Image (cartoon, helix red, strand yellow):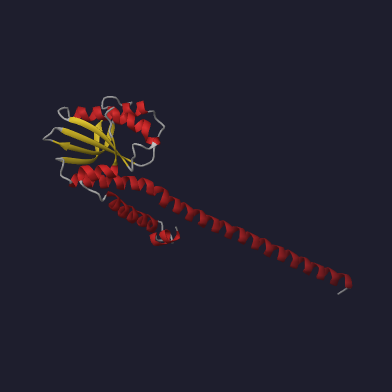
Amino acid sequence: MSFNKASESISQLKMDEIIENLKKKRSAKIIQREYKKHIDNKVYKKLSDYVWVFQGMKICEGFITQAIIYEIIKNSNKYDQVYQEFIIPLNPDDPKKRKNHRVDILCINNKDKVVDAYNSKGASFNNTQSQENDLAEFNKYKEAIKNKYPKHEVNYIILKDNYDKNEKKYKLKCEYLSNNGINHYNTQDFLKCKFNNPNFEKIRREKVNLKLQERIRERGLPITLTQLISNS
C-alpha cells in the first residue's frame, strides 16, 4: 500500500470515528431531550393531579356542608317533611326561560302550614349582581314555592357559612336582603340555636378530611393527610 493510500485510509477511519462520535452525541442529546420531556410530562401530570385534588375540594366541601345541614334539620324532627335538592317549577310554560329551581333544603310543617326553604351558601362573597337583582331572583324562587304550596306561609332563608352581619363586605347586600324578607343567618349559630346542634364544624371537619384522603388515593399521590399537616 502506497503512502498516499495509507494516509487516505487513516483519514477515512478518523472521519468515520468522528461521524460515529457525532451520532452518539446526537443520540445522547435526543435521549436527554426525550427523558427531560418525559420528566416534564410526569411533573405536569403530578401537578395537575394535585390541582384536581385540592381545587375540587371547595366544590366537595359545599356539597358536604349542605348534606350535613340537611341531616341535622331532618334528625331534629321539627318538620314533617325534609327534602334535599327539591325541584320547584319555575317557568313551566316558557321553554325559553329556566324551567326549574332546585331548593337546597325544603322543609314542611303541616300543622302550622309553613314551608321553610334553606339556601346553603359558602363563606365567599359574590358581588357580581346588585342587591336588587338578588332580591328579585330570591323572590321569584319564593313565589314558585308559594305556587306549589298555596296554603302555606313560605320563608326563603339563606344560611351563610361563618356569616357576620357586622362585617363590612356583608353589610350592604345581606342586610338589604334580610330587611326585605330574605333572611340571612350564620350557619353555625343557626344550627346551634334553632336545632340544638353545636357539632356542625366537628362533623364537617371529619367528613372533609375523609373526602380529601379519598381524592388523594384516587389520584395515587405519594402523600397522606398526616404529611400535609406536618409540612404546613
Tell me which corner region of the image, top left, top right, bottom left or bottom right, holds residue 84.
Answer: top left
The residue positioned 26% from the left and 27% from the top of the image is: 92
Q: Is residue 19 left or right of residue 134?
A: right
Instruction: Give residue 180's position: percent from left, percent from top.
Output: 29, 27
The residue positioned 24% from the left and 27% from the top of the image is: 143
Residue 98 in sight from this viewpoint: no
Q: Quadrant of the C terminus?
A: bottom left
Foreground of the two, 95 or 181: 181
Instruction: Give residue 225's position: percent from left, percent from top.
Output: 39, 59
Instruction: Give residue 196's position: percent from left, percent from top.
Output: 20, 46
Compared with residue 70, is residue 38 higher up or lower down, i.e. above or below? below
Foreground of the two, 35 or 87: 87
Q: Quadrant of the N terminus?
A: bottom right
Compared with residue 161, is residue 46 higher up or lower down, i.e. above or below? below
Foreground of the two, 122 or 177: 177
Residue 200 in sight from this viewpoint: yes
Instruction: Give residue 120's position: percent from left, percent from top.
Output: 30, 40
Tell me which corner region of the image, top left, top right, bottom left or bottom right, holds residue 28.
Answer: bottom right
Q: Is residue 201 left or right of residue 55?
A: left
The residue positioned 42% from the left and 48% from the top of the image is: 55
